[in-house]
Image (spheres, rainbow, N blue to C red):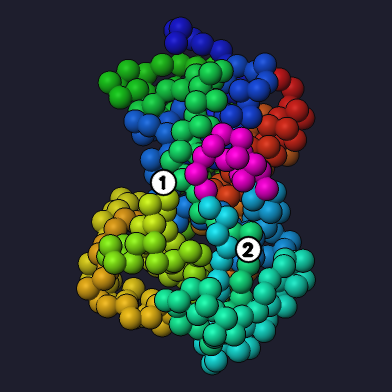
Amino acid sequence: MSKKPEFDVTVIGAGVVGLSIAHFLSKTRLSVLVIESEDNFGKITSSRNSEVIHSGIFNSQESLKYKLCQRGNDLIYKFCDENKIWYENCGKIIVSKEKEIENFKSFTESLTKKGIEFDILTSQQSSKMEQHILSDKSIYIDCSGVIDSHDYMNHLFRIASSHCTFIFESNAIEIKKKEDRYKLKIQRKNKEIETVNSSSIINCAGLNSYNIANKIMGENLKIPSLEFYKGSYFALSSKWRNKFDRLVYSLPQQDDSLGIHISFDSTGRTKIGPDYEKIETKNFDYNVNENSQKKFFDSAKNYIKDLQFSDLTPDYSGIRPKLFFTNDDFSEFYINEENKNGFSNLINLIGIDSPGLTASLAIGELVVKTMIPKMNL
């Protein structure tokens, strides 16, 4: 870059959401800079999840999560088809026990209200679809799937990088609004500090998104701080490879988690998780606690036939940034152009956890096609 470059848009964060936004921006005539603290794109939250394409069934119909998940579900399948990215629209079975009948009824009622098509399966029908699961009564939904998220992000990056400037191992250590633009001080890996001027900022820095917003806005940022939840996964042994053709979930939890569920990748490798552990420190530890194996086994044995304790091996973990508004038990996305808070041409995306992967293209579309045109760029 030149000594004091000028950009129309600076995107902070090159996770799947930042890549999606950059992908849409690459189709405009705006000059774009993307800053990422890691040495490559999508290395944190975006690569530490279940790689599931969700259908919005677990989200409130009134929520932004639901709306963007629904739109994103359509867009991501289309994008994968156009770019020959592996995915499998395998569907999802939600298992239940007889003692959960009231929860089962309320959940099916919520699906009906949302207009989501589903089938109710008996125990025998469930076993016919997935011979290794245990369930007294199940719900089958066919619009969920799994994706090779790394290949997906790689395609987004290749498209975006043809037009956008990416700099890795770089941090925006200072961001100040100066009249009609933002002045950023960017520290590179070698500690060199560069100054960049940008007409607008899009903050999609994942785990660090609240800190970035607070750095820019201070007391003008009117939302709660992020909460962080660790989710670990255990891989099942090779004897379970290709044993499941569909995702397997339990009924929705009372908290904001989706419970320990079964998912798989393009090779048929099967994993269970994630669990749901609130963490207070920001020195994130991604090691999987081997002592949690019993908790995973005790949960999974309720719906996997003949599962043995020794079948489980610690795999990986991720940290989910969650934003809970006052008196709300379930987290929500915050996507806002901060003009009314005194910061024109600043878009904050905070608390983008699940279903962020599924919703990524819908988020990029919203930001670039709806929000940015309203700016004076």
Q: Is residue 190 left or right of residue 82?
A: left
In this view, the residue farthest toward the front is 128
Q: CA distance from mark 1 to mark 2?
A: 24 Å
Where residue 290 sits: x, y (%)?
Answer: 22, 67
Q: Quadrant of the N terminus?
A: top left
Magenta: predominant secondary structure element? helix
Where residue 184 sits: x, y (%)?
Answer: 49, 23
User: Badge 2 local density, few (<14 within 10 Å), some, or many (20+)?
Assistant: some
Say which amino acid is labelled 1.
Ser
Say which amino acid is labelled 2.
Asp
- Is residue 241 located in the magenta-colored stretch of the structure? no
What residue sits 44% from the left and 66% below the top? 244
Residue, disc 1: 47
Number of labels in the image equals 2
Image vertical order of residue 152 relative to residue 100, above or below: above
In this view, the residue farthest toward the top is 2
What residue sits 25% from the left and 77% below the top? 309
Query: In this picture, which residue range is highlighted in magenta?
Result: 74-87
Which tag, 1 or 2, sits closer to the chain's start? 1
- Is residue 81 located in the magenta-colored stretch of the structure? yes
Q: In terms of image quadrants, where is residue 62? A: bottom right
What residue sits 46% from the left and 38% below the top? 151
What residue sits 61% from the left and 76% below the top? 139
Residue 269 has which mark?
none
